[in-house]
Amino acid sequence: MVDLPPRVCRGVRGATVADADTPEDIHRVTRELLRALIAANAIEEADVASAIFTATPDLTSAYPATAARQIGWQDAALLSAVEIAPPGSLPRCIRVLIHWNTHLPQHEIRHVYLRGAEVLRPDRALNIPPVPDDSDSPAGARRNE
């Protein structure tokens, strides 16, 4: 049996940009972001303590957190809020901070920035291809091994 380091709560960050202020687009790009974070870190829903989603003030038609429910996150505590948007900030931006219980050390956490949000953290941007949004079911959120 391999001894794993103790599980601790880590923050996993991500951001994306919606094309339009519609519920369909906000949920679609947020599901895409969540699936990319899940794939990059092998996140299991049972290990997610909570997630905080923010959207810039120009996105008002839907809660980004609803996308997490759409992919099957039924037990995690979720919150949507308005992001501060100083002049010159990235428009139509959705951010997420996932609180995740894991054995991984902080330096191994992979943060994901998609659809132009890479400009927010170029030092953390990964070249991760988008995960297709072919299903809103919980099975569609699972990582293919």
Image: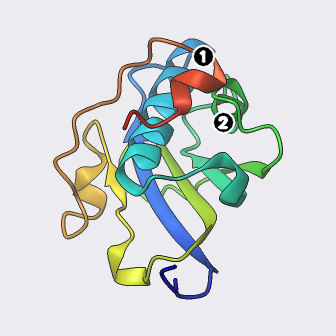
Residue at image position (45%, 11%) is 134
Q: Position of residue 79 (x, y in %)?
A: 76, 50
For label 1, count other residues whose C-alpha is less than 10 Å away and answer few (under 14), some (14-19) or many (20+).
some
| Residue placed under numbered mark 2 in the picture | 68
Asked if disc 2 and disc 1 are in contact, CB closer than 8 Å, the reply is no
Tell me the tag on residue 43: none
Res. 89 in view: no
> What amino acid is at disc 2?
Ala
| Residue placed under numbered mark 1 in the picture | 136
Q: Where is residue 89 in the image (x, y as percent from the top left)?
A: 37, 54
Q: Position of residue 67 (x, y in %)?
A: 64, 30
Return the residue nearer the eye: 69 or 83.
69
For label 2, count other residues whose C-alpha is less than 10 Å away and answer few (under 14), some (14-19) or many (20+).
many
Left or right side of 36 for 75: right
Image height of 101 relative to 111, above or below: below
Left or right side of 17 for 43: right
Image height of 97 relative to 82, above or below: below
Number of disc labels: 2
Distance CA(mark 2)–CA(mark 1): 10 Å
Res. 33 in view: yes
Q: Quadrant of the C terminus?
A: top left
Residue at image position (39%, 70%) is 109
Image height of 4 relative to 28, above or below: below
